[in-house]
Amino acid sequence: MLSLNLPKIEVKITSNNGKYAIFDVLRRRYVALTPEEWVRQHFVHYLIHHKGYPQSLMANEVQVALNGTKKRCDTVLYQRDLSARMIIEYKAPDVEITQAVFDQITRYNMVLKVDYLIVSNGMQHYCCKLDYQSNSYTFLRDIPCYNSL
């Protein structure tokens, strides 16, 4: 797999009939190893081990009901009261981060109403803080540490 713009991690990869799977530390099981999953696992490890995010407050593939359809947020960070605090959307490294990607994560946020949105393709990472009072958002220079949220 491609080297990413994230710290290297130790991964558990298995193979069955030529299909590879990677261990997901949040779901605690092996999942299909796709380029997007490669990014997700690296980013989740980065948040836990470099930014201090509690593993117990994060979940992958969180289902939300949106306009009569079921969608899945790639990763959600929860607060201690289990309300959603952050949505993270991943793309494969070769997928350009465009307005359409931000539109996608914004649709998820219509349901969850979080304070932070992050989009990453493993090479580029964007984080914005939402301000519901002024109906605005600010792009941050870096992914915030958990204790500064």
Image (cartoon, rainbow, N blue to C red):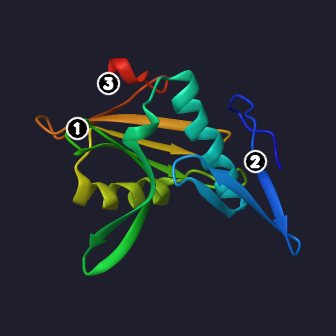
C-alpha distance separating marks 2 and 1:
41 Å
| Residue denoted by label 3 | 149
- Callout 3: SS: loop
**Callout 2: 10 Å neighbours few (<14), some, many (20+)?**
few
Is residue 92 in view? no
| Residue denoted by label 2 | 12
Mark found first going from the N terminus, 2 or 3: 2
Which of the pair 104/11 is nearer the observer? 11
Amino acid at the residue labelled 1: Ser
**Callout 1: 10 Å neighbours few (<14), some, many (20+)?**
few
C-alpha distance separating marks 3 and 1:
17 Å
In the rendered image, the vertical position of residue 137 relative to residue 65, given as above or below: above
Which of the pair 33/97 is nearer the observer? 33
Residue at the left extreme? 133
| Residue denoted by label 1 | 136
Q: Is residue 132 left or right of residue 95?
A: left
Mark found first going from the N terminus, 2 or 1: 2
Residue at the bottom extreme? 68
Residue at x 43%, y 23% (from the top left corner) = 144
Q: Comparing marks 2 and 1, which lies closer to the viewer?
A: 2
